[in-house]
Amino acid sequence: MGGDPIPEPAKVDRSGLSERERNRAVRAWARKNGYAVPTKGRIPMHVRHAYELTHKEASEGKAAAA
């Protein structure tokens, strides 16, 4: 029988973003905050870490205010 193989499902994290959407968000945030990031390829770990710290603090602040 044959046919095309079934594609892998998109990886989604806890925020509900796919990996591609998350990378797009990290790149946009990084450029806005003065980090040099490539348009394609791997995002440097220090940039990803800074993004995670910033967004973790922001989400904790929202929870504390509620």
Image (tube, helix red, strand yellow):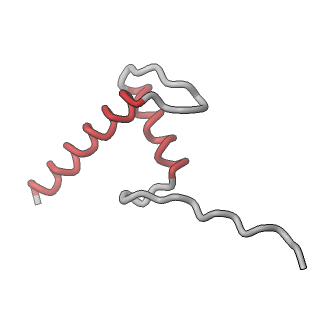
Q: Nearer the viewer, residue 50 or 8?
A: 8
From the viewer's perspective, tell me whether residue 41 is left or right of residue 13: right
Residue name at image x 90 percent, y 80 percent: 1
Q: How many marks?
A: 0
- Identified at 15% across, 57% down, the residue is 63
Give the residue displayed 37% in from the left and 57% down from the top: 15
Q: Quadrant of residue 32?
A: top left
Q: Is residue 5 above or below residue 41?
A: below
Q: Residue furthest front?
A: 1
Where residue 36 appears, as percent x and y from the top left, is: 46, 19
Outermost right residue: 1
Q: Position of residue 48 (x, y in %)?
A: 38, 35
Which image quadrant: the C terminus? Answer: bottom left
Q: Quadrant of residue 58?
A: top left
- At x 72%, y 69%, the residue is 6
Is 41 positioned to the left or the right of 35 in the image? right
Q: How far across and how far down the image is residue 35, in percent?
A: 40, 21
Using the image, determine if residue 10 lies above or below residue 46: below
Question: Position of 63 compared to 21: left or right?
Answer: left
65 shown above or below 22? below
* Residue 44 place in picture, x, y as percent: 45, 28
